[in-house]
Image (cartoon, helix red, strand yellow):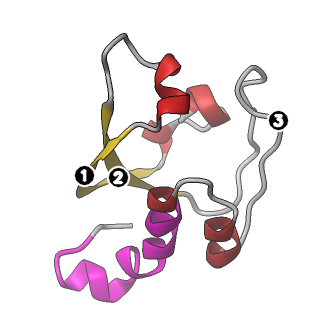
Amino acid sequence: MAEETGIVAGEHALADWGHTLDYEIYPQWRHRYAAGVTRNTEHWFGLCVSHPLPVTLAPREHLQYAWLPLEQAAERCFSSSNAEAIRQLAWRTSPQAESAGGVAR
């Protein structure tokens, strides 16, 4: 988080969602990985902040950011798994999820 946004995860409530997804890396992106790597495992986490925080982007990686309502944020995702994780934020952080053993806020 700190590298990408300047937000220090340890200062907020970080929750492991216990969700992993193994997928094949698109051929056009494999140059970013070690030779021979064709699969990646994604782990989902949630970071609960009390309000929109100032963001400091890594200038070699990102051009801009925006704080958006969940559905608008999901619609902007290139990755379908990132979009799904954003869509799950509402129920994963709800009081009902907490009482059912879900992710704590």
* Residue count near mark 1 (Cα–Cα under 10 Å), binned few <14, some 14–19, many ≥20: few
Q: Residues within 10 Å of mark 3 (few under 14, many from 20)?
A: few
Q: Position of residue 38 (x, y in %)?
A: 33, 29
Q: Does dot 3 land on a helix, a strand or a loop? A: loop
- Please state the horizontal and vertical placement of residue 43, each as a whole percent of the image: 31, 46
Q: Read off the residue under disc 1.
A: 20
Determine which residue is flagged by label 3: 63
User: What amino acid does circle 2 point to?
Assistant: Trp
24 and 45: which is toward the camera: 24
Asked if residue 65 lies left or right of residue 91, the reply is: right
**Left or right side of 99 for 1:** right
Residue type of the residue flagged with mark 3: Leu
Mark found first going from the N terminus, 2 or 3:
2
Residue 74 location, x and y as percent?
Answer: 61, 68
Q: CA distance from mark 1 to mark 2?
A: 6 Å
Kindly identify the residue that appears in the image at 76 percent across and 45 percent down. 54
Tell me the CA gap for discs 2 and 3: 24 Å
Q: Is residue 76 above or below residue 71?
A: above
Q: Is residue 16 magenta?
A: no
Residue denoted by label 2 = 44
Residue 99 falls inside the magenta stretch: yes
Measured along the vertical axis of the image, is residue 92 above or below residue 31?
A: below
Q: Residue at x 35, y 85 (%)?
A: 95
- Disc 1 + disc 2, Cβ < 8 Å: yes
* Gap between marks 3 and 1 measured at Cα: 28 Å
Give the quadrant of residue 98. Answer: bottom left
